Image (cartoon, rainbow, N blue to C red):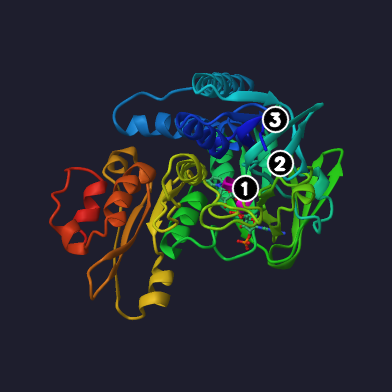
Amino acid sequence: MTYDYDLFVIGGGSGGIAAARRAAQYGTKVAVAEFSRLGGTCVNRGCIPKKLMVYASHFPGLFADAQGFGWSGVESTLDWKKMLAAVDNELTRLNGVYQNMIDNAKVELFRGYAKFLDPHTLEIEDRKVTADKILIAVGGQPVKPPEIPGIEHAITSDDMFLLPEQPKCMVILGGGYIGVEFACIMNGLGSEVTQIIRNDLILRGFDDDLRSGIQEGMQKHGIEVLTIAESPTIEKTPEGLKVTLAGKHQGTIMADVVLSATGRKPNLEKLGLENAGVEINKGAIAVDEYSHTSQEHIFAVGDCTDRINLTPVAINEGRAFADTQFGGMSRTMCYENVPSAVFSTPEAATVGLTEAEARERYGDAVKVYRAKFKPMYHTLSGRDERTMVKLVVEEDTQKVLGAHMVGDSAAEIIQGMAIAIKMGATKKDFDATVGIHPSTAEEFVTLR
Ligand code: NDP
């Protein structure tokens, strides 16, 4: 049987494009289908525009800090439309970079929504194509909890980059990455923010010191974080959105915008997976360690598989798939010690086991080294900011199991720590490393 393509990739996001380019390098005939802008969630509705807005949100703090260093005060206001237009320009540039990358790799691009007709045949708009192997890399989308009355009035993170005006007052539902990052961005940009979470602390699953460190920092910056187990209700009124709270914070909040940041789900509805016999498990495509689906020749990577939903993970999964299927290697993605950051203000980053996870695994043989201090910059800025650094160590082997940080440049610092931890560094290795002085990062090698 001959096919039109050796590999057809559904989805032109981080995972799909990485896999397509790598497969093409091995001489594979590859095509990609994408119905929207190239680059997927990360480039168009996620990491990139979010991080650009994080930068924008830091300027008022910097202007204020400067006075502690002898600068006169700065009067400046935000032009919301100008900020979003600048962000969008950069996204358009990146869309072009992606286009160039696939053109240079000689990967064919189909503009349209791909749907399975049978296990080897896809329909894209009115064209039918066949492929020997098919990779599903369709990503995910935000979900709103249907049980919340009036949730149809809430927007999702996708809409945040399209708001015609900056909300003066905003309510955010959810205490995950997206809720926390947008709470900090909008607070920094000058909106009044209330974040509603259903646990005592934001960011369930992260190290508790990191969770409390960020939350305390956010509250100091003026974000109201309300812990409410009961669902609120949302009502549209002529004055704006009325959010009614139950439980211990009973009352109402008037908001211009309510953001539902309550999780994401894979984009599987219209793919016709049933026509290809691809199995789904708990709403995500079921895959093995080589990203095989229930069909031997169909694979899936990235957020549609619900492993770890991070761009670099999708890219690694895509490349491991291409190396294995077309490069004569046997490569799988390793999910241990995957570092990640929360681009909140204060920023936080983490790699390896949390203290709770380490204690569950190693019991009493876990030693924790922690420091919380006022960083040098803030000795003159006058702001009451705290940085937290923490190492989780297994006492018997001295192996560093986890590193966690809250504070400026946490992502940049933890990225370096992640290499050491991935290589199996011990506390003695950290102790034997000379610090860079004066820096925050040196605290990691002087913890006693
Ligand atoms: P998360 O799953 O991380 O968080 C969802 C939040 O919403 C949780 O606090 C959850 O509470 C809460 N929640 C869920 N359902 C309800 C409900 N019915 N009522 C009230 N609260 C609810 O999802 P996000 O959307 O924040 O992020 C999705 C993924 O995107 C992340 O897991 C991450 O992988 C990725 N991402 C990564 C970023 C980064 O690396 N910096 C940035 C943004 C996203 P509970 O904890 O109790 O379940």
Dot placed on the residue nearer the N-terminal end, 2 or 3: 2
Q: Are marks 2 and 1 in contact (CB under 8 Å)?
A: yes
* Side of 447 relative to 10 (left or right): left
Q: Which residue is mark 2?
A: 120
Does residue 178 appear in the picture of this structure? no
Measured along the vertical axis of the image, is residue 162 above or below residue 331?
Answer: above
Q: Which residue is mark 3?
A: 163
Query: For the residue carrying disc 2, how many other residues have a C-alpha within 10 Å: few (<14), some (14-19), or many (20+)?
Result: some
Tell me the residue at 56%/55% (across/down). Answer: 307
Mark 2: which amino acid?
A: His
The mark found on residue 297 in the picture is 1
Residue situated in front as seen by the camera: 314 or 70: 314
Front: mark 3 or 1: 1
- Residue 375 is situated, as x and y percent measured from the top left of the image, at 29, 47
Mark 1: which amino acid?
A: His
Residue situated in front as seen by the camera: 148 or 10: 10
Tell me the residue at 57%/46% (across/down). Answer: 302
Badge 2 marks a residue whose secondary structure is loop
Dot placed on the residue nearer the N-terminal end, 2 or 1: 2
- Residue 391 is situated, as x and y percent measured from the top left of the image, at 30, 62
Q: CA distance from mark 2 to mark 3?
A: 41 Å
Region of the chain picked out in magenta, as a range: 297-305
Residue situated in front as seen by the camera: 430 or 380: 430
Mark 3: which amino acid?
A: Leu
* Residue 46 shown in magenta: no
Measured along the vertical axis of the image, is residue 418 above or below residue 48?
Answer: below
Query: For the residue carrying disc 1, how many other residues have a C-alpha within 10 Å: few (<14), some (14-19), or many (20+)?
Result: some
Q: Quadrant of residue 119?
A: top right
Q: CA distance from mark 2 to mark 1?
A: 9 Å
Badge 3 marks a residue whose secondary structure is loop
Mark 2 sits near ligand 1, with its Cβ under 8 Å away: no
